[in-house]
Image (cartoon, rainbow, N blue to C red):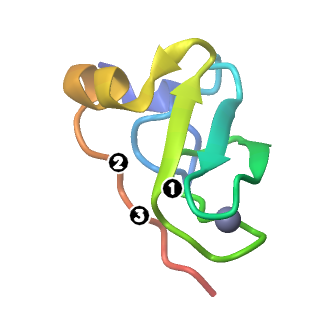
Amino acid sequence: MSRQNLYPGGDGITRISDPFWMNYCKKCGHAFWSCLCTVDCPQCGNQDLKRELGTVPYEQIIAERGEPIKPKSE
Ligand SMILES: [Zn+2]
């Protein structure tokens, strides 16, 4: 896989050509879009989110592309 198609400084797996990630918080139910798959819930800070890239589940993306890199926060 060519890394130049990935978001610079991103999570290491999301490509620029990908759709947004859809995130569903399992704790508070908040749903939101993000460019990367490593964001936490902005409402409650929960890290356990159900994620989909377009219609593809997170688990399938990970299986195909490998584990994401968690960017340093702050
Ligand atoms: Zn939440």
Q: Is residue 36 above or below residue 54?
A: below
Residue, far top: 55
Q: Residue at x 49, y 77 (%)?
A: 72
Q: Which amino acid type corresponds to the residue marked 1 in the rendered image?
A: Thr
Labelled pair 2, 3 in contact (Cβ < 8 Å): yes
Q: Which amino acid type corresponds to the residue marked 3 in the rendered image?
A: Lys
Q: Residue at x 51, y 41 (%)?
A: 50
Q: Nearer the viewer, residue 8 or 46?
A: 46
Q: CA distance from mark 3 to mark 1?
A: 6 Å
Residue 44 relative to residue 7: left or right:
right
Q: Give the residue at mark 2.
A: 68
Q: Give the residue at mark 1.
A: 38
Q: Is mark 1 within 8 Å of ligand 1?
A: no
Labelled pair 1, 2 in contact (Cβ < 8 Å): yes
Find numbered disc 2 in the image and state the secondary structure of the residue it sits on. Answer: loop
Q: Is residue 66 above or below residue 28?
A: above
Find numbered disc 3 in the image and state the secondary structure of the residue it sits on. Answer: loop
